Image (spheres, rainbow, N blue to C red):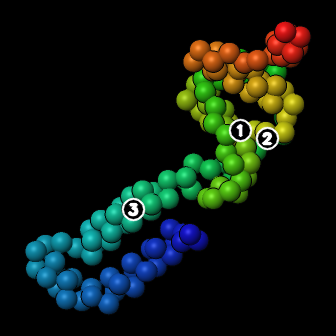
Amino acid sequence: MGVTLVTVFAILTVAVSQTSEIYLQHLEGMGVTLVTVFAILTVAVSQTSETLFPGAFSCCTKISDEIPKGILRRVERFDIQKADGLCHLEAVILYIEGRKFCVSPRIRRVKKWMKKKMFKIHRKNGRRQRTKIKKKREKKQ
C-alpha cells in the first residue's frame, strides 16, 4: 500500500491529459474553464485519498521524549499509535483542549499514567482487577 497522494495525482493527471482535448472543447462550449476543471479534480483527489488512507493523515511524525509535570492531569483522552501499517512511529497521542500531542510511550511517567487510566477504565466497566493480595488469599484457601 505504498500509494501516495502524489502517485494518485500523477495517474489522474495522465488520464485527464489523454482525454482532455475532447472534454475541454465540450466544457469550454458550456462556459467552464480549465481552472475550474482542475480545481474540481484537485478536490476530488484530496477527498478520495483521505477516504482511502485515513490513518496516513493523522499519524504522529515527531514525538517528544520529555513531558511537563502537570500536563497529564489535563488530558481528555489518549490513543496509542503502533509502528505498523501506515504510521512509522510508536507513540502515545494525548488530546488536550482539542490539540494533539505526540509523546514517546517509553517515558516512565506516561507508562505509569496509562496503566492507572487503564485500571480506571476496567473498574468503570465493572471488571475488577485481581491484585497480588487477592491471589495469595485464593491460594491459601
- Report crowding for label 1: few under 14, some 14 to 19, many 20 or more residues within 10 A (C-alpha): many
First reached walking from the N terminus: tag 1 or tag 3: 3
First reached walking from the N terminus: tag 2 or tag 1: 1
**Alpha carbon separation for disc pair 1 and 3:** 28 Å
In the figure, is residue 77 to the left or right of 104?
left
Which image quadrant: the N terminus? bottom right
The percent coordinates of residue 86 (x first, y second) are 61, 59
x 18%, y 72%: residue: 32
Residues at circles 2 and 1 in contact by the CB criterion of under 8 Å: yes
x 22%, y 73%: residue: 33
The percent coordinates of residue 52 (x first, y second) are 45, 60
The percent coordinates of residue 79 (x first, y second) are 63, 36
Dot 1: element: strand
- Report crowding for label 3: few under 14, some 14 to 19, many 20 or more residues within 10 A (C-alpha): some
**Which residue lies under the disc numbered 3?**
48
Q: Which mark is residue 92?
A: 1
Which image quadrant: the C terminus? top right
**Quarter of image, res 44:** bottom left
Q: What amino acid is found at the position of numbered circle 3 in the picture?
A: Thr
